[in-house]
Amino acid sequence: MMIIDSQVHAYEENTENRPWDTIPEWPEQVTGDRMVKAMDSLDIKGAILVSPFSLYGYDASYAVEVRAKYPKRFGLVKPVDPMDPQVGEVISAWKLTPGAVGVRLMMTRAPVSPRQWMGSDNPNFDLVCRAASRNDLPVNLLCWDNLEAAFELIDRHPETRFIIDHLGVL
């Protein structure tokens, strides 16, 4: 049986070249090389590599680098900024990235930026859903403590495929 891990995060240590946005209580680094070694030890053939928002925000460049090194092992998911007026274009450009398989919307109860509110009535969330659907990309939702708002958004967009990640954290 082929095993695919549905969500992993790979990241380098916190450096000036690639600084972290926050300093979580995580291992110092989980590089792409270490991830592949761990996957091999468990006979995991592939994984969906989700760029870790807590560390890199909307910058998925490290995930793209890892996927370029291991193109047969990873699909890529990029967090997108719903408050970016160009979010539709960002999603269209992401679709052209080798290995891109989805976008991620941060929909936790607390805003991830002062400009963003997390209710399902945020019209920018609708823009993300429509752009993702047009580009045939599912939307990963991180929505702990805000599941009801996520369900409202999902109900409004039957044409969009959704994945609710970290559901066990609820």
Image: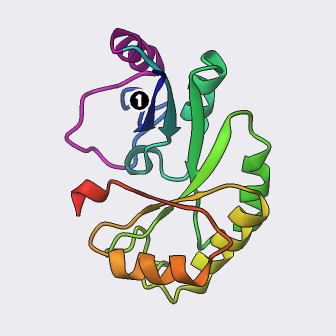
Is residue 125 shown to the viewer in this render? yes
| Quadrant in the picture for the C terminus | bottom left
Q: Position of residue 55 (x, y in %)?
A: 40, 44
Q: Nearer the viewer, residue 157 or 124?
A: 157
Relative vertical location of residue 30 with respect to residue 115 in this rendering, above or below: above
Residue 34 appears in which quarter of the rendering? top left
Relative vertical location of residue 101 with respect to residue 112 in this rendering, above or below: above
Disc 1 designates what residue?
Answer: 15
Magenta stretch: includes residue 32? yes
Q: Position of residue 70 (x, y in %)?
A: 60, 17
Relative vertical location of residue 101 with respect to residue 62 in this rendering, above or below: below
Q: Nearer the viewer, residue 161 or 14?
A: 161
* Residue at far bottom of view: 121
| Quadrant in the picture for the N terminus | top left
Left or right: residue 94 versus residue 145 is: right
* Residue at far left of view: 25
Residue shown at the point (77%, 58%) measured from the top left: 135
Is residue 59 shown to the viewer in this render? no
Q: Position of residue 17 (x, y in %)?
A: 51, 30
Label 1: state its secondary structure: loop
Left or right: residue 144 versus residue 162 is: left
Q: Position of residue 146 (x, y in %)?
A: 33, 76
Residue shown at the point (40%, 20%) measured from the top left: 35
Magenta region, residue range: 22-42
Q: Nearer the viewer, residue 33 or 8?
A: 8
Query: What's the amino acid at mark 1?
Result: Thr
Residue shown at the point (36%, 27%) measured from the top left: 13
* Residue at far front of view: 1
